[in-house]
Amino acid sequence: MPGFQNETAVSVIVGTLLLILITVIAAAGLAIMVSQMQKDEMNRQSHLTAVKNEQIQVLNLGLANDPAAWNQTPVLIPAEQSWSNWSSITLTMVNLNTDDVKIVGIAVNDHYARTFTTISDTPLPEHSQYNVSQNEYLTIPGTKSQKVQINFTDDFPATRYVVTGDQIKIKILTSLYNTFEKSFKPPNPVFEMNIETEDLGVTERDVLVLDGTKSTADNTVVQWDWSVLDRGNAVNVSGDIWNDQNNITTASGKTVRVTPKTPGPFSVKLKIKDDVGMTQTSGATEVPVNSRFSPPANLNAEFSNQHVLVTIRDINGNLMPGITVNFVVGNNPYGNLTFDRYYNTTDTNGSTNTNWTGGIGTIKVVYGKLSAVEIPVG
C-alpha cells in the first residue's frame, strides 16, 4: 500500500509540472505572437508615417522649343512660322521630407516617360540618364532638390506632342506609391494699344504704345515679348502665313513704344512668360494704315530745264508718294513771275513739279511744318 501512495503522489507532481510547462510555453508563444503583432503594427504605422510624410513638390518648368531636336514633321503656327511643339521639358523637384525619396515614375500629361536625364549644375553641368523601364530609379535625398529633363521625342515609348500654350500636368510616382501632381496653366496675354503723337519740331510722328500690364497668370508674369508684323510689305504665303523674316519689329517689356518705319497696316502679338516657364501668345490685333507713322520729314527742291523739281522723303529716308505740296510766289520784283500749277502731288517715286512759264523771282515750295524752299527762276 505505501508504494502505491508514493506513485500516486509522483504522478500528481509530474502532471502539475507538465501543466505548468504547457502554461509557460503557451504564455511564451502568446507573448511572441503579441510581440510580432506589435512589431507588425509598428512597422505598419512606420510605413503609414513614411507614406504620410513623403512630400515631393515641382518648383518650376523649363520648356525648350528647339526645331533641331525634332525628328518628326513640325507643326507651324500661322503668321509666325515658328515651331508650335515643345521639344523638351526641364523640371525641378524638391524633397520636402527629411528622409530620402525614390522616384519610380514621372508623367507629363498622364504619359509616363520611359527614360529621363538628371542635371547637376555644380561644379559643372553633369547629365545622368535613368531608364525607368529597366528599374533605374532616382533617389532624392531629404530636403534636397533635383533637376530632371525629359525629351518629348526620345524619352517616351512614342513621340509626345505637347503644343506651346497647352496646360501641362506633371505627376510624380514614388516607391511608396505616393503620387504628387501639379498642373501648370499657361498665362493669359492681354494688352491695350494706343497711338500717341510726338512733336519732332519739323513734323509730328505717331507711335504705337503697347501695354501688357493686364495680362494674367496663376503665377507671376515675368516676360513680355512683342512682335509687330508689317503686313504692308510682308509676303503672304498662304492663309495667315507670311514671309515676315525681314518685316517684324520686336520689343520686350511690360509697356513699350514702337516706332513703325512704314504706314502699315500692322499685326501686333504679345507673348508672355510666367515665373515657372509657361508661355502663351495672343491672337493678332490689327493696326490700320496710318501715314503719320512715317511722316514726311525732308523736302528737297531744285530748278532744272524750266521745271521746279521736288522730292519728299519720310522720317526714315524713304521716298513718299501721294504727298501734296504747294507752290507759291516768293520774291517777285517785277510782278511778272508765272508758273503753270500752284500745287501738285508726288508720284510713286516721291517726286512732283511745277513748270516755270515766265518772269523773274523765286518760287516757294511749301509743305506742312517742313521748312519752305525758295527756288530762284528766270
Image (spheres, rainbow, N blue to C red):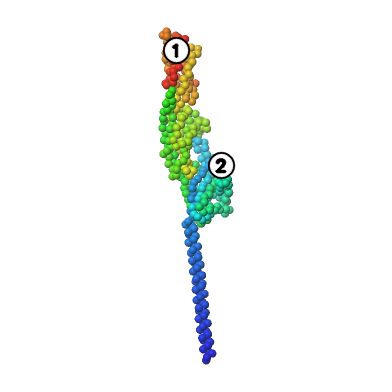
- Neighbours of disc 1 within 10 Å: few (<14), some (14-19), many (20+): some
Q: Name the element at disc 2.
A: loop
155 sits left or right of 335 in the view: right
Q: Is residue 280 visible?
A: no
290 sits left or right of 103 in the view: left
313 over 162 or under it: above or below: above
Q: Is residue 84 visible?
A: yes
Q: In the image, which disc is placed on residue 23?
A: none
Q: Residue furthest front?
A: 123
| Disc number lying in front (1 or 2) | 1
Disc 2: which residue: 70
201 over 337 or under it: above or below: below
Q: Earlier in the sequence, mark 1 or mark 2?
A: 2
Q: Name the element at disc 1.
A: strand
Q: Amino acid at mark 2?
A: Trp
* Mark 1 to mark 2 CA distance (whole Å): 70 Å
- Neighbours of disc 2 within 10 Å: few (<14), some (14-19), many (20+): some
Residue 31: % across, % down: 50, 71
Residue at image location 50% in from the left, 32% down from the top: 248
Residue at image location 45% in from the left, 34% down from the top: 256
Q: Are marks 1 and 2 in contact (CB under 8 Å)?
A: no
Disc 1: which residue: 362
Residue at image location 50% in from the left, 62% down from the top: 43
Residue 88: % across, % down: 54, 44
Q: Nearer the viewer, residue 35 or 293?
A: 35
Residue 147: % across, % down: 53, 48
